[in-house]
Amino acid sequence: MTATPGEKRPGLLRHLPLLLILCIALVGSFTLRDYLSFDTLRENREALLAFRDQNLVGLAVGFFAIYVIIVAFSLPGAAVASVTGGFLFGLAGGTALNVLAATVGASAIFLAARTGLGATLSRKIDASEGTAGRIRDGLRDHEINVLLLMRLVPAVPFFVANLLPALVGVKFGNFLWTTAIGIIPGAIVFTWIGVGLGEVFDRGETPDLSLLWEPHIIGPILGLCVLAALPIVIRLVRGRKEI
């Protein structure tokens, strides 16, 4: 009888990282929204630029760490952080830091979910048949294409694109590189907005993040989505013809 609690405890501990992330995300959504904002960046603009000029490496490390925490705990302010990367480090440096930090943070969520709820759910999906089994097989047959689509389609929330693959048993290696590659187009757009942020602040305005939906921006991204989806469509069409 005394062995049962001991046997259950490791299972409960596996869920602890994901539960911690969810709790911090919930608390952060209410307490940090007013702090991780463009108003905060505007107020601290001169201090940040002065610190950058004195200690570029230190600021880059600090920015990277904060961005990883924002993504890993799904805190509000990811878009602000991306724009800030362009404001402080330029298009090339800002994009590199944004992509690297976002990828590391996304990997943290993936691994937290994989060690707990993801492992349990993945085993159940592996043992299932019928519709669930077909979905499982379809996802694994098109794993890379689906992962790239989730990153490229702007309508897919970043947290969902981090969590869902872990819950259905996606390989971590594929998740890692598709995340790094798939977020580059969006990262370039937000970093680009940040490059001109000083002029926006000088005019007393707030950055317009709706630029992502402009035809000349969203068009190429949707084109990449079509390329990622094309192998899935072709295989589905071939499968129907064989039937």
Image: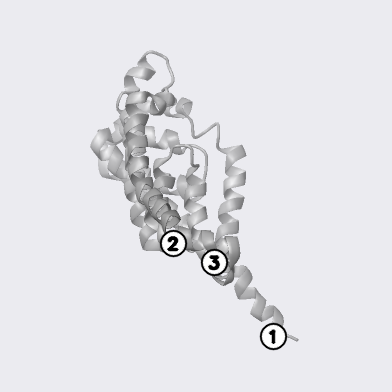
What element does badge 3 sit on?
Answer: helix
Mark 3 burial class by Cα count in 10 Å: few <14, some 14-19, many 20+: some
Mark on residue 122? 3
Q: Nearer the viewer, mark 3 or mark 2?
A: 2
Q: Quadrant of residue 43?
A: top left
Q: Position of residue 6 (x, y in %)?
A: 66, 80
Q: Nearer the viewer, mark 1 or mark 2?
A: 2
Q: Which residue is mark 1?
A: 3
**For marks 3 and 2 on the same chain, the one whose residue lies earlier in the sequence:** 3
The outermost residue toward the top is 203
Q: Is residue 113 visible?
A: no
Q: CA distance from mark 1 to mark 3?
A: 26 Å
Q: Is residue 200 visible?
A: yes
What element does badge 2 sit on?
Answer: helix
For residue 123, above or below residue 95: below
Mark 1 burial class by Cα count in 10 Å: few <14, some 14-19, many 20+: few
What element does badge 1 sit on?
Answer: helix
Tell which of 224 and 210 is nearer to you.
Answer: 224
**Do the residues under discs 1 and 3 have CB atoms within 8 angstroms?**
no
Q: Residue at x 54, y 66 (%)?
A: 122
**For marks 1 and 2 on the same chain, the one whose residue lies earlier in the sequence:** 1
Label 3 is placed on what type of residue? Ser
Q: Nearer the viewer, mark 1 or mark 3?
A: 3
Q: Which residue is mark 2?
A: 140
Q: Quadrant of residue 186?
A: top left
Q: Residue at x 26, y 44 (%)?
A: 57
Report whether 58 appears left or right of 67.
Answer: left
Q: Residue at x 41, y 51 (%)?
A: 237
Tell which of 51 and 158 is nearer to you.
Answer: 158
Label 2 is placed on what type of residue? Arg
**Do the residues under discs 1 and 2 have CB atoms within 8 angstroms?**
no
